[in-house]
Amino acid sequence: MSKEGYAVEGRQRDIDFHLPGNQPEMTPDETRLRVEELRAYYGKSLAVNNVTLSIKTKKVTAIIGPSGCGKSTFIRCLNRMHEVTPGARVEGKVLLDGGDLYGSGIDPVEVRRRVGMVFQKPNPFPTMSIYDNVAAGFKLNGSRDRRIIEDKVEKSLKMAALWEEVRSDLHKPGTSLSGGQQQRLCIARALAVDPEVLLMDEPCSALDPIATAKIEELIHELKDSVTIVIVTHNMQQAARVSDYTAFFYLGELVEFGATGDIFTTPEKRQTEDYITGRFG
Amino acid sequence: MAGNTLYGAGTGASRQHYLYRKGIEWLAWIGMLFCTGVTVFILLMILGYVLYQGASYINWEFLTALPLPAGETGGGIANALVGSAMVVVVATLMAVPIGVGAAIFVNEFPSAQLGRFVRFLAEVLTGVPSIVVGLFAYALVVRPLGSFSGLSGSVAYAFIMIPIILITAHEAFRLVPVSLREASLALGIPKWRTILWVVLPVSSRALLTGVVLAIARALGEAAPMLFTAFGNPFWNLNLKKPIATVPLLIYTYATGPYEDWHRKAWAASFVLLMVVLVTSVLTRVFLRGKSNE
Amino acid sequence: MQGEPQVINRPLGRLLTRASGKLVHPDAQVINLGDRFFYTLTRGLAFCVIFLVILLVLDLFRGSWEAIRQFGLKFLVGTTWDPVARQFGTLPTIVGTIVKAFIALLLAVPISIGSAIFISFYTPKWLRPVISYPIELLAGIPSIIFGLWGLFVMVPVIRVLQVWLKANFGWFPLFNGPAVYGVGVLAGSAILAIMITPIIAAISRDILLTVPRTQIEGMLALGATKWEAIWKVALPYARTGLLGAVILGLGRAIGETMAVTMVGGNSFDLIHSLFDPVHSMASQIASEFAEATYSLYVSSLIYVGLVLFGITIIISLLAQLLLWRLSKGRIAILE
C-alpha cells in the first residue's frame, strides 16, 4: 500500500487491517462497542460497578446521571484512558467490533486511535497553532507529506464546522479561539485521527448556550460518519442529541434504552425520579 | 477472538511505523532511566566516599582536640567546630530579624509594591555567588576594622541567609489561613498583635525549618570565609579576630601537602555532611509532621 | 470525577488567599499606634534588604574603582594578568568561566531534564520521593565537599581519560593539551555538571509536575504514546520554566567557587584545549585575594568580582523572571 494511499484513506485502512477477510456488511443498528461486566476502580474504591451495555454503530449514545455516578469514569474506560489516572484499574471487557480492548497484548495507543475522545474542558495545546493542533494526532502515523496533512486538516476542520471561522488564521495559537471554537478544534483534532468511535466527556459543560447549540448541531452531523458516546449532566441535551440513553446512578447502570423510551416511559423508579428532577 | 491479535499489528507501512514509534518510546524510557540512574549513582558515590573516608578517621580526639602543627599526625578540629558555630550563631542573630521582618511586611501588607519587589529581590539574591558575598563583607567590615575577623564572616553568612529565610518565611505565612487572622481581628485585636500571636505561632514550624535550612546552607560555605573569618590554627573565641571554620579548614587541608591533612579534610567533610544530612532529614520529618496536623 | 490535578489548584488557592487577604488587611486599617509602629518596623526591615543590595553594589564599585580608572573596559579584553608588572586583564578567566559553565550545561541539561522527566512521568507516585529526595539532597551538599571529592576521586580518573584521549584523538585540537595535570577545563566542567544537575533536575521536576493532566491526556487520547505526549505536549508546555531552570543552573555554574578552585586549575593563560588548566573568575578571586599585596592588585580582583556579580545577577534576574510565575519559593529552599 502506498504511503499516500493509506494516509488519505485512513478510515479505509483501519477497517482494512482490523477486520480483514470476510467482513460482514454493516447494518445501521449493529453493535460497535460491547461492554461486559465492566468494573472500574480508583485505588480501592469502586467507581463503576458491573456495567454491561452495547453501543450501536453510527448512533449517539448519551450517558446521564447525577454527578459522581461514574459516568465520566465509564467512558474513560472505553478508550483505556481510565488507567492513565494513577491508581486506577479496570476489570471486565470492552469489545470493539468483537475484539477486547483489555485483552492481553493490546496496546492502549492503538485503541485510542480507533476510539477518540473529547474532554470536559477544551484542551487545545497552547504551544501549537490551530493547524498543528488538528494535525497533532494525524501526524503520529508518520505522514510527512504536507499536501496530505493540509488536506486532512481542512477536512477535519470542515467536519467540525470550524473551517470557515479559522481558515485565514490557521497559524494562530489554538488558545486564541473562543471556548466554543476551542472545543470544536478539539473535536477536529480527534476526528483527524479517523476514529471509529468518538467519546465526549461533558463537552459542553464549560461552554455558553450558543456554543453548546453549535456543538449539538455538530453531533447530529457527525453521527453519519462516526459512533458517538456522550456524557452529559444536562438531560435536555441528552434528549436532544442522542438515540440511546444510559442512566447511571452510584456507579451502576440503572437503565439503558432508546432515548425516547427512557424519557417518556422509564422502567425504573430511579430513572423517572432523576429525569423529572426529583433528585440529583 | 480473531480480531484481537490484529491490534497494533496491521501490515506494511503502518505496521512499520507503529513499531518505529514503539521503539522510540522504549528508547526514551531507557534514556530517562539512564539519566536518573546516573544522577542517583553520582550522589551515592559522593556520599559513600565521604562517609567511608571520613568515618575511618573520625574519633573523639578529632572532635575535641586542637590542631597540631603542620606535618604532625593527630590533633583535631575543635577550634573550627566552635568557630563555625560562633560565626553562624551571630549570623543567624543578624539574619533572622531582617528576613522574618521583611517577610512579614511582604505577606501582611500585600498592597505595598515594595513588598513584591523585595520578595523578587530575595529570589534574585540567591543567585549571587558566595565569593562576591565574601568580597562584600571584606569591604564592609574587614577594611574598616583593619583585620580579618569572625564578625566579618558572620556578616557574609547573614547576607547568604537573609534571602533564604525571607523566602521560606513568606511561604510559611502564606499558608496561614485567612480565617485565623479574621477570627483574631474580629475580636478587636490589633493587627500587630494578630501577627505576633496568631500568624507567627501558627507558622512557627515552617519558620524554624527555613532558618535551619539557611543555617545548614551557610555552614557549608567556604568561599565567603576566605578573606573574612580567614581561619586560625589556634583556639579563639574572640569574634574580632580571625577564627577557624570547618569548610575553610577542609579547603586548607585538602589543598595542603600532607597526607594526614587530606585524611583530616575527609573527616571534617564527614562532620559537615552529617550536619547537612541530619538537618535535611529532620526538616523534612518536621514539615511532614505539620501537614499531618 | 477525575478532578483537576492538585498542582493547578494551588496557585489559584494562593491567589484567592491573597485577594481576600487584601480585603481583610487594607493598609488603610493601619491606624492605631501599635499597628503603625509595626508597619514602619517591618517596612524598615524590608528596606534593609534593598539597602544591603545597594551597599553591595556600591562596595564593589568603590573597591574596584582604582582598577576601573586604571584599565577601564580594556580590563575585560586584556589577556595579561601580571601582578609583578602591575598589568591586569581578565579575558582568559572570563573565557575560562564561560567555557566551563557551558560545557557543564551541555553535560548536565540532558541528564537533569531526563531525570526530571523520569521522575515526573514514569515513576509511580509512591516511588517519586524515593528517587527525588536523594537528588534534592545532592543539591544541598556544600561545594567544598564536591571540591574535595573532585580533587581526590574525580581528577585521577579524568587524568587517565585525558591520557587516553590524547593518545587516541590527539589530532583533535580540543584534546591537544597537556594531559598530565588532570585538573583543568575538563575536570572543572565535570564537577560543575555534577553540582548543577540536581538543581536543574529538582526545579524541572517541579515545573513538569505543573503541566496539566488534561494536556497530556489530550495527546494520549489521540493515540500518542506516552513519550510522544511528553515530547510534543508536556515539554513545549513547560518550556519557559525549564529554560528558567537551565539558566539558574548556568548562573550557579558561573558563580561557583570552591570546587572549581580545587579542580579547575589555576592558570591565567587563554585556553586552547579541554585539558588546559584555567582560572574561573571566582577561583581567581578565591586563590589570589589573600595574597594581593598592593591596592591596585586588590582593586583588580574586586573588579573581577564586580564583573562576576554583573554576569550572575543578570542571569539570576532572567531565571527568576522565567520561573517567577511558576514555582515561587521552591527554588531558594532547594539550594
Image (cartoon, coloured by chain):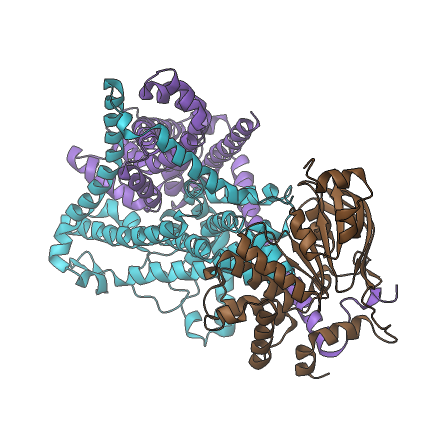
Chain colours: A brown, B purple, C cyan
- Front residue of A158/C110: it is A158
Q: Is residue A143 left or right of residue B113?
A: right
Residue C111 visible to an observer of this rendering: no
Q: Is residue A24 above or below residue C84?
A: below
Q: Position of residue C83 (x, y in %)?
A: 19, 56
Q: Residue at x 19, y 48 (%)?
A: C298
Residue A134 visible to an observer of this rendering: yes
Residue at the extreme front: A264
- Front residue of A31/C38: it is A31
Q: Is residue A60 left or right of residue B177?
A: right
Residue at the extreme bottom: A2
Q: Residue at x 39, y 18 (%)?
A: B186
Q: Position of residue A6 (x, y in %)?
A: 70, 79
**Quadrant location of the C terminus of chain B in the rendered image:** top right
Picture quadrant where residue A186 is located: bottom right
Picture quadrant where residue C134 is located: top right
Q: Is residue B162 left or right of residue A131?
A: left
**Quadrant location of the N terminus of chain B in the rendered image:** bottom right
Q: How many marks?
A: 0
Q: Position of residue B209 (x, y in %)?
A: 45, 30
Q: Is residue C130 above or below residue C90?
A: above
Q: Is residue A56 left or right of residue C206?
A: right
- Front residue of C260/B259: it is C260
Q: Position of residue A157 (x, y in %)?
A: 57, 70
